[in-house]
Image (tube, grey):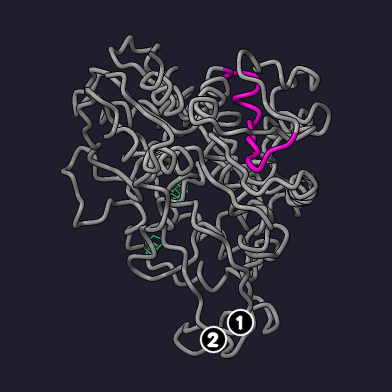
Amino acid sequence: MANESDVRYYKPKAEFSLDITDIQNFVYDMSRCIKCKGCTWVDHTYMPGAKFMTRCPSAEKYQFDSYGAYGKMRIGHAFGEGVLDWNEKALEIIYACTLCGACDVGCKRNLDLEIELSLESLRVKAVQDGVGPMPAHKKTAENIAKNHNTYAAPHDKRKDWIADVKPADKAEVLYFVGCAASYTNKEIAQSVAKIFKAANVDFMLMPDEWCCGNTVFSVGMIDEAKALAQRNVDEMRKTGAKVLVTACAEGYRMWKVDYPKLLNISTDELGFKVLHLTEYADQLIKDGALNMNKAMNTRMTYHDACSLSRLSEPWTPYEGKRQWMGCVEPRLERRRGTNGVYEPPRDILKAVPGVNYVELPRMKENAFCCGAGRGTREAFPDLATFSAEHRLEEIKHVGVETLVTACPHCKNNFAQAIKAHGDDVQVMDIAEAICASIES
Ligand code: SF4
Ligand code: SF4
């Protein structure tokens, strides 16, 4: 057993913070997991039936308790107490997880434990202990260090997506494109530019845009992630732009939540506003600056990207003391996923003429992750594919012709699964859907 100084979670008035670089901050939470599996089952009040009643891709695929959040909490607790050493299986379990946050919002219905932060902290520990991340993640990290993008593509080709609509040199709105829309999903970047033009909004780009660092952060490479966060925030501040808009859900989460987390500031202290395209375009439509008048005669649904939904609530640093019975002082404003970006994309799609919009059974904070993000597709392509195929069953269940996503990583993962199975579903990004409805 650990000695008394190691077991802060037993001591009343023990100090703790939400700093993920010290796993001891989360051992209390890990130790209090009661294995109720509220993190795996969709909330009872929304339970859409036996077929779609789970929310954890990892537990659903591997069908073994260690892969659920409850298993990872046991493993983390044992690490925190110093009674378990890393082994190949433990490492695989910690990384064979999409860090989608579904378990976190599920657990917070029950016990208010910080599960997502515990999972992030476990990965940071894996890297600190010299065993993590997985080899595929190291390759991505090398690409980012060398070419400032995740794909090993030449950095000087980053702006090659620019076509008819040219960015301004200076503007109040800065479009952060991200690696995917710059290289593999240029159609999304071009659609975003067309939306700005249709609304008569001048936009600029970062003079020298680099990767947001989502993969390095998500796999626990905290030093690399912190350096990127500082560099990108400094560069953004230098531009003088007041609003950063991005159409990538993972980039959005990095700028809005994880950069402040890494830099130990609150989201409000960034000095600029971070908006996803769906928030920005929704306001343009509601203000009458963007008119969607071309009909899209299709039955359509929307997939909530984890990083735009339950993981997108603003960040506020916290330091306090844990009292008896686990109560904390001062009061901790929990991030429970209920204030994610849920309505703007729905309002946009419902405003498109001719759209027959239907919801998926698992939606908003209960949505099932597509499986692509946070380093999953790189290291565990089978889990990423399983997750997309499982979600696709739900999409086919509601009988839609068009699936709309708001993240290039979701779009690509679903497109691969649809192609592999020859399914009759069209997948498009919400930027493309808006464009289809404003172009005459
Ligand atoms: S909901 Fe929370 S307490 Fe229950 S099993 Fe999951 S992590 Fe443990
Ligand atoms: S983050 Fe997602 S995949 Fe990982 S344990 Fe939680 S629900 Fe499962």
In percent of the image, x 71 and y 35: which residue is there? 211
Q: Which of marks 1 and 2 is nearer the N terminus?
A: 1
Residue 308 percent coordinates (x, y): 47, 44
Query: Range of the magenta residues?
Result: 170-186
Instruction: Name the amino acid, label 1.
Output: Gly
Q: Residue drawn 49% across and 25% down?
A: 198
Q: Mark 1 sits on what residue? A: 320
- The verdict on label 2 being within 8 Å of ligand 1 is no
Answer with the quarter of the image where residue 379 lies. Answer: top right
**Could you tell me if the residues under marks 1 and 2 are in contact, i.e. CB atoms within 8 Å?**
yes
Name the residue that disc number 2 marks. 329
Is residue 63 at all visible to an observer of this figure?
no
Q: What amino acid type is highlighted by mark number 2?
A: Glu
Q: Where is residue 291 in the image (x, y as percent from the top left)?
A: 37, 29
Q: Which residue is drawn at 39% across and 22% down?
A: 438
**Image spot of residue 294 (x, y percent):** 31, 19
Residue visible at 50% across and 27% down in the picture: 195
Magenta span has 176?
A: yes
Q: State whether residue 420 is above or below residue 172.
A: above
| Res. 177 image quadrant | top right
In the image, farthest residue toward the left? 49
Tell me the crowding category of disc 2: few under 14, some 14 to 19, or many 20 or more residues within 10 angstroms, Cα based.
few
Quadrant containing the N terminus is bottom right
Q: Please say if 235 is above or below 136.
A: below
In the drawing, does residue 379 fall left or right of residue 325?
right
Query: Disc number at residue 74?
Result: none
Give the side of residue 325 with respect to residue 14, left or right: left
Q: Which of 439 and 80 is in front in this view?
A: 439
